Amino acid sequence: MTFQVRDQIFTVCGICLGLSGENAMTSIQRWLSSTSSLTNRLQVIASLAQFANTCFLTCYIGLPARLFGNKCYAWSLGGCVFYFIFQLASSAIMISRASILIRRKWQPLIYATGLALLLAVFSSTLAGAIMQPATVDASGYCQTDFNWNNTNNIGKTILIVLYAGLLMCFLVPLGQQIHASYLHFGGGDVTDTLLQIGGSFSARVCLAIVAFIVPQFFSFIFGGDPNLIGLQGMGFIVQNYFAVVASALAMEK
């Protein structure tokens, strides 16, 4: 990896690090200022784990391999712990909130399906993490080559399916609630609140889906340019950030 590529990565890492820190502080403030629900606690765990994951990647990419004892593979594999923690917590929040308007008898099925898909994501991502080659490059830095076109992208594709399904599970009954509100009350505060929650949830999940899809093409966009090839790995950080943002829907109202 050239120093030019490393500078590009640091720019993206710096932006995402600041955004991740802000998101973590917001989650903590919401947890401290409201009822200490399980969802709020999970949101704090997810945001802190994602922030730690971004910090780890920044250090792993930017610090010489000798500071890691030249054990690049072990450190790279250990850093995946932060990813699994935040992905589990944020996805659990998404599944819980997306099914809140579903009839109670169908909720166990939504939970089971969501957890099954999440297990498939973890299995694929873990396989990619174990098989990843991590070496010390000519500049003396750790370099990890994720299997972007196979195991990693398979996991991201399953996440896209999961998020899209959860979005539909939320929007369909929400639309029915809004329609019923217009029929019985002619609009008003209740309808406005439902529209606000629906719009916020939809925007966040759609951003997460786009953030998962676009980096799938990074290997084709940047792979042919040696000065930009490192940016294909930055899709990982972008995806992680928006996954946490998608689960950060405020439900105070």
Image (cartoon, grey):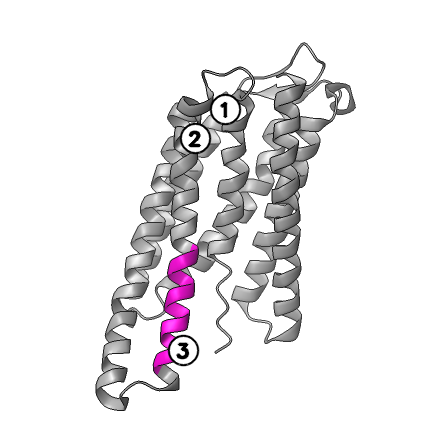
Q: Which residue is mark 3?
A: 193
Query: How far is mark 3 from mark 1, CA to CA?
Result: 43 Å
Magenta span: 191-204
Whether residue 193 appears in magenta in the rendering, the answer is yes
Q: Residues within 10 Å of mark 1 (few under 14, many from 20)?
A: some
Residue 230: x, y in percent? 55, 23
Residue located 36% across and 51% down the image: 163
Q: Earlier in the sequence, mark 2 or mark 1?
A: 1
Residue 60: x, y in percent? 68, 29
Q: Nearer the viewer, residue 135 or 175?
A: 175
Res 237 → quadrant = top right
Q: Main secondary structure of the magenta part?
A: helix
Does the CB distance between marks 2 and 1 fall below 8 Å? yes
Residue 196: x, y in percent? 41, 72
Q: Nearer the viewer, residue 145 or 86?
A: 145
Question: Is 203 drawn above or below residue 105 in the view shown?
Answer: above
